[in-house]
Image: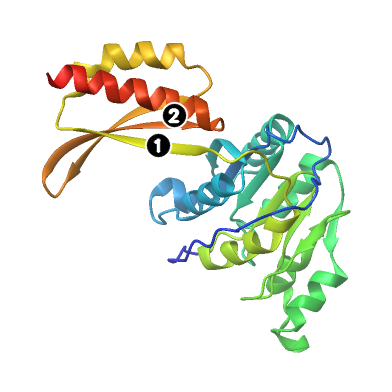
Amino acid sequence: MTDSTETRTVLPEAVTAEAAAPEPAARNVITAAILVIGDEILSGRTKDKNIGTIADYCTAIGIDLKEVRIVPDEADRIVAALDALRHAYTYVFTTGGIGPTHDDITADCVAAAFGVTIDIDPRAKAMLLERHKPEDLNEARLRMARIPAGADLIANPISKAPGFRIGNVFVMAGVPAIMQAMLDTIGPTLDTGARVLSETIEAGNMPEGTYAGGLAAIAKAHGAVSIGSYPSMTQTGFANRIVVRGKDAEAVARAKAEIVALLATLRI
């Protein structure tokens, strides 16, 4: 497996391509899950940087990220997780496990989950030859050209070893810079929904316990939005922020107004 390194987050300004998932979802309800694969993530040796990048990307284009799973380099665990997620959500993004070493088994597991064969793909081999001389394309490197039957390739402009897409599953590298490049490539092919709007209300140093009851009542009355309270430590000390999220601007505004009024009453 390959260690993660720091990368950038580049969000798309607009995406208009039609959906490519097996069963098209409603315009405003596009969902996704992330499956992170690798013992090194679970052991703490490698700190994942891809989840946040994909989450930001999805939010920016109106895809609701609903679940993240992290599984070890164990075939049965990968296949089971992939099967569960691909049947539950519009898209699944996997990261990790497509390198040249013995523990890079993601491609084999994806093939098993979809019930298809896997072999060296001439297209993928040609991509690897853009970086390696034919005599250097040894058995280990050729592992990165093994692609499940029927999959489309995802270009890798950095190290050339491609990712791939099969059904509603996008299989990408674990190295953040390469994953980002692959995400930039597949972004225009994704169906998108209504974007989530977010409003933040500063509660200052008011303890959560002071406004928790009133906030719960507001949340119950405004089911179309999500309301959360988030404590944090700032340079000036302890502070609380309340965040209202939703796809309906008027619903978000109404909930925000009630929260602002609640805090004003409690400060009197």
In this rendering, is residue 62 above or below 135? above
Comparing 202 with 253, the one in front is: 253
User: What is the secondary structure assignment of the residue under circle 1?
Assistant: strand
- Residue 75 place in picture, x, y as percent: 66, 43
Comparing 89 with 226, the one in front is: 226
Label 1, residues with CA under 10 Å away: few <14, some 14-19, many ≥20: some
User: What is the secondary structure assignment of the residue under circle 2?
Assistant: helix
- Of the two numbered discs 1 and 2 on the same chain, state the one appearing first in sequence: 1
Q: Could you say which quadrant of the image residue 201 lies in? A: top left
Could you tell me the amino acid type at mark 1? Answer: Glu
- Residue 265 place in picture, x, y as percent: 19, 17
Q: Could you say which quadrant of the image residue 210 lies in? A: top left
Report the number of discs. Answer: 2
- Residue 3 place in picture, x, y as percent: 47, 64
Q: Which residue is the site of mark 1?
A: 199
Q: Which residue is the site of mark 2?
A: 253
Residue plotted at (11% across, 42% down): 237
| Image mark for residue 86 | none
Label 1 to label 2: alpha-carbon separation: 8 Å
- Residue 167 place in picture, x, y as percent: 81, 45
